Image: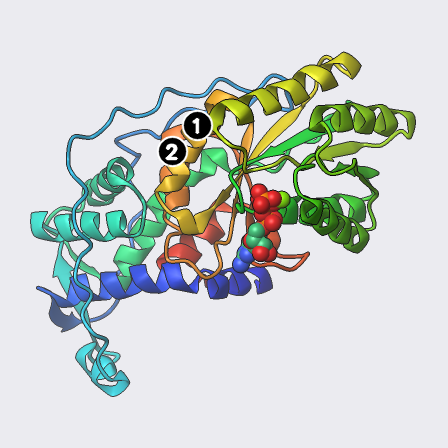
Amino acid sequence: MAFFSKLKDKLFKSSSRLEQGLDAIVEDGGEETAAPDPVLPEPEPAPQPVPEIPTTEPALEPPEQPAPAPADPKPIAPPPEIPESKGILNRLFSRGSAATEMRRTLDDDMLEQLEELLIASDMGVDTALRVTSNMAEGRFGRKLSTREIKQLLAQEVARVMEPVARPLPIYPKRPQVVLVVGVNGSGKTTTIGKLASQFKQAGKKVVIAAGDTFRAAAVEQLQVWGDRAGVPVLTAPEGSDPASLAFDALTRAQAEGADLLMIDTAGRLQNRTDLMEELAKIVRVIRKVDDTAPHNTLLVLDATTGQNALSQVETFRKLADVSGLIMTKLDGTAKGGVLVALADKFGLPIHAIGVGEQIDDLAPFDPDEFAAALTGLDKG
Ligand SMILES: Nc1nc2c(ncn2[C@@H]2O[C@H](COP(=O)(O)OP(=O)(O)OP(=O)(O)O)[C@@H](O)[C@H]2O)c(=O)[nH]1
Ligand SMILES: [Mg+2]
């Protein structure tokens, strides 16, 4: 599939880190055995279920989220040493001919190395432990090839991600109000531009409100995206009240019969109280026009911040009623594993992923493709 190879290409840094690590783990303590590659058995039923997500949708009320997993006392282990890559001929040679391949017995040592590798890929301690113990279930003592380990890992990652992979729900309510929040530079404005373009192409009438009124440059940036997407951008003078802009924008979106109103917000305020008050005021004011708004509160996260994304979710859930996530900048980072930790820990829907700065670099989140791209598995 064309998009899959693009995704794999874009997630190269994450997948190559995992791939190199897995190769190193199997080579370390593995032995060359005669191939035929045995067919991987069907996975056992998951011994440790991932959080239950209610599936009823669309719903205006955000679904109840499962309680976060309890903190694991185990400290974060240092990343495993990834050996210098050998020359390509050497590597080919060391992997044996078509008739042989490296395999390693799945034992405690190997599991520990796997855990460390996953933690180093920003999966977080709890998630790494859960994923590796599921991988080991029923396979302890078996000799596994790198490819089999990748397949197992991809299966487990996909299993964690499956319940959260949901496109942005579209409700019959018009205009549907989407409030976009996130820290400074996470990609809110860019993501709004990309989403606006996709919804416009899908035949929706979209309006954008430039709620980051603190910087003139922010408004200009949004106008550029609006022009690209062919979507009107409602603005207010620099320094004016974002809540009153949001109010005007919703009133106008209603009058014009728009399907979707997306409200950009400022990521950078003096402190958390300011940000909380600002977001709360926007919500309060738009509810004067439509008491069910906002219908979605999207938290935009930057994948390059790694584990920090977890604390951003915690913070923003206190500030706003976050209904779903969008993870940007998955291209060019080795920290893609953080998405697995987010899914495992919060169970919030992941609507889309950003894989570049261009208008079409926003993809719906597909758990199987993501898992295969992350683990460096060739989907065939
Ligand atoms: N590589 C890459 N860059 C991205 C992606 N999404 C956004 N960016 C870039 O990240 C930078 C910040 O994006 P913005 O959309 O301005 O972020 P913001 O959250 O609106 O930032 P503030 O308005 O300052 O809070 C820009 O240079 C974007 O081009 C992505 O998926 N991949
Ligand atoms: Mg912005």
The residue that mark 2 highlights is: 311
Residue at image location 27% in from the left, 58% down from the top:
148
Does any portion of residue 246 appear in the rendered image? yes
Q: Nearer the viewer, residue 298 or 237?
A: 237
Where residue 183 appears, x then y in whole percent?
51, 39
For residue 343, side relative to residue 233 (left or right):
left
Left or right, 38 with respect to 299, comes to left
Q: Quadrant of residue 13?
A: bottom left
Dots 2, 1 in contact, CB < 8 A: yes
Q: Residues within 10 Å of mark 2 (few under 14, many from 20)?
A: few
Q: Residues within 10 Å of mark 1 (few under 14, many from 20)?
A: some
What is the spatial separation of the Cα atoms under label 2 and label 1, in whole angstroms? 6 Å
Figure check: 175 above or below 22: above
State the image quarter where residue 126 is shown: top left
Task: Give the camera-side residue of 180 and 41.
Answer: 180
Q: Which residue is mark 1?
A: 315
Residue 94 in picture, x, y percent from top left: 17, 79
Element on which disc 2 rests: helix
Along the horizontal axis of the image, is 240 left or right of 38? right
